[in-house]
Amino acid sequence: MPHIEIAAEKVINLFGLGVTNTLLTSWIVTAILVIIAVLIKRGINIVPAGLQNIFEFFVERFLGTMEGVFGTREKSEKYFPIVATIFVFILLSNWLGILPGIGSVGFIEEHEGKELFVPLFRSSASDINFTLALAVVAVFLVNILGISAIGFGKHLSRFISFRSPVDFFVGILEFISEIAKMISFSFRLFGNVFAGEVLLVITAFLVPYAIPVPFLMLEIFVGFIQALVFSMLTMVFISIAVSHH
């Protein structure tokens, strides 16, 4: 039976700091996104053709979804880079983690007298540190955008208000909800991706031919859904934070 480890394994040391396999994968995802962005920027024409048509189609559909939440095209275009970047980054991280070779290339390490296989690469979202960091960044970003949109005083009044006992109590609940968002964001993404990886490993070990294929298709779908859920919730929270009412 293959060894399954919840915590990400350290694979290299960089300037005295341990780099885990999940962090290494996230660096690769970042590099891929940068390369794709540069290639797309160089190939953009006033009259779209080929892949640019496909790219603009998905951008328009995404903007249309955002417009339904924000209410205006102007706001949708303003916050599109943030929401779309979160979606694409999580999606590519999830899909890269189930590619052939990811998880099967690594080295043998001795631990407590046992030889354990340590994969060189591992899906980024299968590490709670990655999902928690992403959740913290998303929630802090929501509050920063709220402050920039309606002002520090009005945004702070959501959490601290002495106008009435009810408003004061609601402010406490709002503050607790910000912490709950981080926990919900991080554990939802981590739980689904890690469970999927365990499922694929077990099925591949027990029945290595044909049977894992349907589960692989399922994980492709789950990876898309989780990226969509994370980005859509971020979009809704941004919409609430930048509203004046």
Image: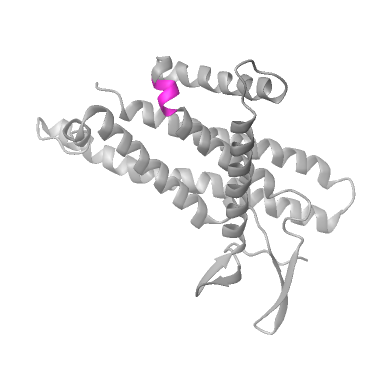
Q: What residue sits 65% from the left and 83% below the top?
A: 112
The answer to whether 78 appears left or right of 53 in the picture is left
Q: What residue sits 47% from the left and 28% below the top?
A: 80
The answer to whether 83 appears left or right of 75 in the picture is right
Point out residue 226 in the picture as x, y percentages from the top left corner.
58, 38
Q: Name the image quarter holding residue 91.
A: top right
The answer to whether 14 appears left or right of 72 in the picture is right
Point out residue 60 in the picture as x, y percentages from the top left corner.
56, 18
- Most extreme residue toward the right, as rendered? 209
Q: What residue sits 90% from the left and 50% below the top?
A: 209
168 lies above or below 46 = below
Of residues 73 and 178, the one nearer the viewer is 73
Q: Is residue 38 magenta?
A: no
Question: Magenta residues, as a range?
Answer: 75-79
Of residues 155 and 7, the one nearer the viewer is 155
- Classified by dominant secondary structure, the portion drawn in magenta counts as helix
Point out residue 57 in the picture as x, y percentages from the top left corner.
63, 19
202 lies above or below 33 = below
Q: What residue sits 63% from the left and 39% below the top?
A: 36
